[in-house]
Structures are given as structure tokens and as C-alpha cells.
Amino acid sequence: MRTVLIVAQSLDGFITQHDRPGTDWTSLADKKWFRSCLAPFDASVMGRVTYEVSRDYILAHLSPHRSRVVMTQSPDLFQHDAQPPTLEFSAETAPQLVQRLSTMGRKHCAILGGTKVHDAFFAAGLVDEVWTTLEPRVFGAGTPLTSIPHDVSLRLESHERLPDSDSVLLRYTVVR
């Protein structure tokens, strides 16, 4: 299974503006690009906080063609939202999730954050690509892209300025 970590971050490496979860601070161009970039993915994985911030949008846009898995230590707390296999809540590890999704026939998985999810997939060596939108913002504080030490080498595959913005999309491949 191909896994792509997709994230927007400030120039100083934060994925949230200070202590506010979510991506309200990202450009309209990034929001538009993000929605369109998910089309080829038949699976996505996110953490509890990412889900809670986007819950209404996710519930309104469920598709039988895409599995969405929320990584949480307390999946039972979300039984009322679960709609297997299109929306699941799981305490599985990143390798267990990738294996299960692969067994289900899923081929392309978007890793959507947050930091704990990024850490789990990087630590397991399960990130194949990183697509990041660099937003022209500097926060000085916020949630970092990762929170534990990793040593991952990346090769720049492409870069582009998003239309009508000062946001830059960078696409990297993980070097193994």
C-alpha cells in the first residue's frame, strides 16, 4: 500500500496555529487543493483530534469507495459515529492498520494527522511520500509536524505555487 502524509504547515513547522486545533489558518487555495488531492485515495487515517475538528464534514462526505480510520486509544467512545468500513475508530498500530487496509484491497492511503499519527507512521517506516503545503505564516508556537525524534530523508519530487496564493506545495518521496 502506498501511504502519503498530507499536511499544511507554517514556515516555522507548525501544523496548528498556537493551541487551536484544525487548519482554519490555511489559505483558501490550500483548502481547495486538499479536497481535490484526496480523490485518488481509497483510504485515509487520522487521529482523534483531527477527526473531531472535521467531524461534520467527514460525516457528510462518507463514500463506500474510501475507508476512513480514526486512530484513538478509546474507539468505544465513537461507536455512535462508526459506519464500517467507511468510517472506523481503531486502537490498532500503524502497521496493523496498513495490513488490514491492504487486506481489504485498499491501495492508496492518505495520512492526515495529527502529530501522533505522523509519529506512528514515521516510526514504523510506513510513510512513502510527504506532500506539504507551506503557508506564508510564522507562529512561533503550535503543534509540530512530529514530536519524537525521526531521521527520515526525503527527495523533492515537485514544487508549485498554489493558484492565487503565496502558498507552496512541496511533494517529497521518502528515501529508503
Image: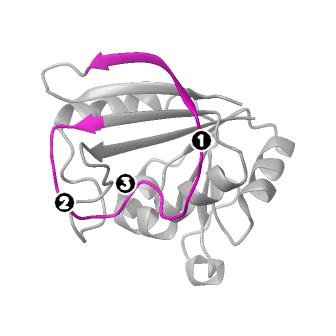
Indicate left or right for 74 with 57 as reference.
right
Does label 2 or label 3 sit earlier along the sequence? 3
Question: Which residue is identified by label 3?
Answer: 57
Contact between labelled residues 1 and 2, with CB atoms less than 8 Å apart: no
| Mark 2 surroundings within 10 Å by alpha-carbon count, few (fewer than 14), some (14 through 19), many (20 or more) | few
Callout 1 environment at 10 Å: few (<14), some (14 to 19), or many (20+)? Answer: few
Q: Which residues are magenta?
A: 134-161
For the residues labelled 3 and 1, the Cα–Cα distance comes to: 32 Å
Colour scheme of the rendered structure = one colour
Is residue 32 shown left or right of residue 59? Answer: left
| Residue 147 is covered by the magenta coloring | yes
User: Residue tagged by mark 1?
Assistant: 152
Name the residue located 47 percent from the left edge and 57 percent from the top edge: 146
In this view, 49 is above or below 45: below
Dot in front, 3 or 1: 1
Pointer 3 with pointer 1, Cβ within 8 A: no
Amino acid type at image mark 1: Val
Residue 38 location (% of width, % of height):
48, 33
Q: Nearer the viewer, residue 69 or 149?
A: 149
Most common SS among magenta residues: loop
Q: Quadrant of the N terminus?
A: top right
Task: Look at the image and say whether residue 23 sits in the magenta stretch.
Answer: no
Determine the image quadrant of residue 142.
bottom left
Distance in Å between CA atoms under marks 2 and 3? 29 Å
Q: Is residue 40 above or below residue 53?
A: above
